[in-house]
Image (tube, rainbow, N blue to C red):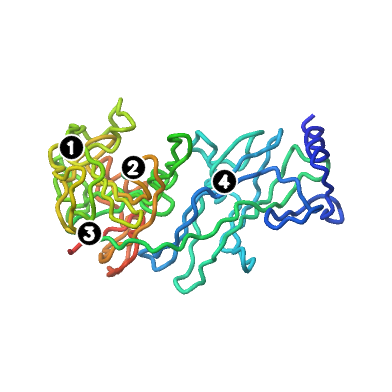
Amino acid sequence: MVTVLAVVALAAAGCGDSDDDADGSSSTSSSNATEVGNEQFTPIVGAVEFAPVPFEGSDGKVHLVYELSVTNFTSGSTKIEGLKILDEGSGRAVGELTGDALNSRVQPAGSRDGTDVLDAGQAATIFLHVTLDKDATVPDKLIHEVSVNAEAAPPGQNRITERLGEVDVDDRTLPVLSAPLRGERYIAADGCCDAVRHTRAILPVDGQTYVAQRYAIDYEQADEEFKIFTGDPKDPKNYEIFGKEVYAVADGTVVGTKNDLPEQEPGTFPSGISLQDADGNYVVLDIGNGFYVNYAHMQPGSVKPKVGDKVTKGDVIGLVGNTGNSVAPHLHLHVMNGPSPLASQGLPAVYDKFSVTAQVASTADFDASEGTGIPLKLVPGLSPSDHEDEMILDQNLVTFTD
Ligand SMILES: [Zn+2]
């Protein structure tokens, strides 16, 4: 039955399959510059809805982080067997995913579980991360080549290689931020570029999807023994970062703020928090050129700036707390393209000056330390390094000296 439907779809489109391989088992299409008569049946359709913005990370590499939205537009299941990210100009592959590496990045709408098989009509987001050497040429334009096995294709033509999601790389100039905190051993938890909790937090808001937290960092802090807290985990005061001053990372104007939400007991996420209260006591700063900075979860009463106030880089804007949807005291910070912490797209930014003194071994090790108070497990043998104008990456332990 599904095969019949697919054949009907092809017949209705009036197209042949003139690029068939000799054995007729596969076809290749190019979604851009299709010549009349060369149109192809492409079970997966999609687009990149927010273009990647390249930036340099603390690993000295250039990163592009973005999502390819796809829909299996057929009446049968379609397995995505491989995905190549191509420099559209040169045809060179700048990324390639198969197997588990691909599967883990394909997130069906409404799910956090990876899959490589899309059911009939199912939509998904493929979370992509391209890493390039610092001196490599950053493509002007990307296109995606996916190899699929589509149940609802004409007999013998189930395996299809198709192209979709052509996108111009966004080369806007990024803001250079100063330190949001001061001191040693701040942990950049759930940071760029593959952190499930932020980078993949795609939200349907106001009629479309947004990834406001695409580049968000949850800053926590370790003591000299690399413990995030000591003593009773339910007392926010026992966390190393609690009460630390939070600084304006750039000159800006306050466009959103909240100051009256109560501290939550750490250890478990609070229940019954509304979408609007998820950030707890927060400040959104308009820092110009279409960039906005969101600071979340600060202490009640500590957020002094009011909407309309101008702040200067280095001004104290609040104290680290545990308000809103927070499991432990931390500073959530992200940069975005609009004033709403939810209905905006996350943008990258770099920090003017910081040192990386260590690296937490994994997110699981971070979670274990945050959950139980055991010392952080660190990557052994890492030499401290000083950085300028780079993004702080996931699980870096950083010192801010400003
Ligand atoms: Zn966060």
How crowded pointer 1 is (Cα within 10 Å; few <14, some 14-19, many 20+) is rated as: many
Residue type indicated by callout 4: Asn
Q: Are marks 1 and 2 in contact (CB under 8 Å)?
A: no
Residue type indicated by callout 1: Asn
Q: Is residue 276 above or below residue 96?
A: above
Q: Position of residue 174 (x, y in %)?
A: 36, 62
Residue type indicated by callout 3: Ala
Disc 3 and disc 1: Cα gap in Å?
A: 22 Å
Disc 4 and disc 3: Cα gap in Å?
A: 37 Å
Q: Is residue 376 above or below residue 203?
A: below
- Mark carried by residue 341: 2
The residue where tag 1 is placed is 259
The residue where tag 4 is placed is 103
Q: Earlier in the sequence, mark 2 or mark 4?
A: 4
Q: Residue at x 63, y 69 (%)?
A: 90
Q: Residue at x 50, y 35 (%)?
A: 111
Give the structural element (helix, strand or loop) at label 4: helix
Q: Earlier in the sequence, mark 1 or mark 2?
A: 1
Q: Earlier in the sequence, mark 3 or mark 1?
A: 3
Disc 4 and disc 1: Cα gap in Å?
A: 42 Å
